[in-house]
Image (cartoon, helix red, strand yellow):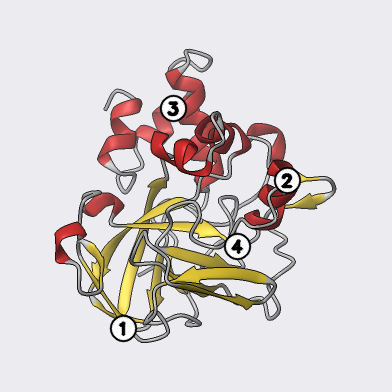
């Protein structure tokens, strides 16, 4: 593990739209102590109840307040048939709690609750501009590593009845991000995400998304940025393929 962990810079002109009004997304208004935390765990697509915490309504299954096992294929809680469908590079999807007030405003939907964007982790105190590819975090007994931006599923638009939602997630930069699991163990809501390593401080998830999308749409040829990103070995294979690697 490296020492003297660097903090990513935020040249917003080079990233997708990264704020609402004058509030940048990394300035999480819900973050009360400066420590990123696991606000909510979601191990089922079917909610069984809801609770309000830190001003965020959390929809969850009945036993999510208990520790959940995080394995190499992702979260598991009594439903192994749906375990590991995304592949190990994208075993866990995280979404920023800070984005929910923005989406409620933009979609005029106050009922939008944590877990709505198919995330497993709703994270307090982080966004795509502060999380970098290769970041390793200790959460409870487990260790996870950021592997890529999250690619929104098309059925999300259908389920939330917003036809262009997947595209809006991409163009806003509020996609969420994916983890691979480096070490298995039990995790629980409320635990801090403790940064262990940051090998690529120059590659926040927001910048990776911007470079990959521009390259995919032929707006960005094989520039230095693309070449440098191709050298980011901890970027997931599916996103590396977008760059022709």
Q: How far is the residue under mark 2 from the one under mark 3?
A: 37 Å
- The residue wearing badge 1 is 141
- The residue wearing badge 3 is 226
Depth order, front residue of 222/29:
29
- Whichever of labels 1 and 2 marks the residue nearer the N terminus, that label is 2
Left or right of 20, for residue 129: left
SS for tag 4? loop
- Whichever of labels 1 and 3 marks the residue nearer the N terminus, that label is 1
Mark drawn on residue 97: 4
Depth order, front residue of 84/12:
84
Disc 1 crowd, CA 10 A, few/some/many (<14, 14-19, 20+): few
**Residue drawn at (44%, 61%), measured in percent from left and top?**
198
x then y, percent, for residue 86: 25, 49
SS for tag 1? loop
Q: How far is the residue under mark 4 from the one under mark 3?
A: 30 Å
Closer to the eye: label 2 or 3: 2
Residue 168 figure quarter: top right
Quadrant containing the C terminus in the rendered view: top left
- Whichever of labels 1 and 4 marks the residue nearer the N terminus, that label is 4
x then y, percent, for residue 146: 39, 56
Mark drawn on residue 179: none
Left or right of 153, for residue 170: right
């Amino acid at each position: 593990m490296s020492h003297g962990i660097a903090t990513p810079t935020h040249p917003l002109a080079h990233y997708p739209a990264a704020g609402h009004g004058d509030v940048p997304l990394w300035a999480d208004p819900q973050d009360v102590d400066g420590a990123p935390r696991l606000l909510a765990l979601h191990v089922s697509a079917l909610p069984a109840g809801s609770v309000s915490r830190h001003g965020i309504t959390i929809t969850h299954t009945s036993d999510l307040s208990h520790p959940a096992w995080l394995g190499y294929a992702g979260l598991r809680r009594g439903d192994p048939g749906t375990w590991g469908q995304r592949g190990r590079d994208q075993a866990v999807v995280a979404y920023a709690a800070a984005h929910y007030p923005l989406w409620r405003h933009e979609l005029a939907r106050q009922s939008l609750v944590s877990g709505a964007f198919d995330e497993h982790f709703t994270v307090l105190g982080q966004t795509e501009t502060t999380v970098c590819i290769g970041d390793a975090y200790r959460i409870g007994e487990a260790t996870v590593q950021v592997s890529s931006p999250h690619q929104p599923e098309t059925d999300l638009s259908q389920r939330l009845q917003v036809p262009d939602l997947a595209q809006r997630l991409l163009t806003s930069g509020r996609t969420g991000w994916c983890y691979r699991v480096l070490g298995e163990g039990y995790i629980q809501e409320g635990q801090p995400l403790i940064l262990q390593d940051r090998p690529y401080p120059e590659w926040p998830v927001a910048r990776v998304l911007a470079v990959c999308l521009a390259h995919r749409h032929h707006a960005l040829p094989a520039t230095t940025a693309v070449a440098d990103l191709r050298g980011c070995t901890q970027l997931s294979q599916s996103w590396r393929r977008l760059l022709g690697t």
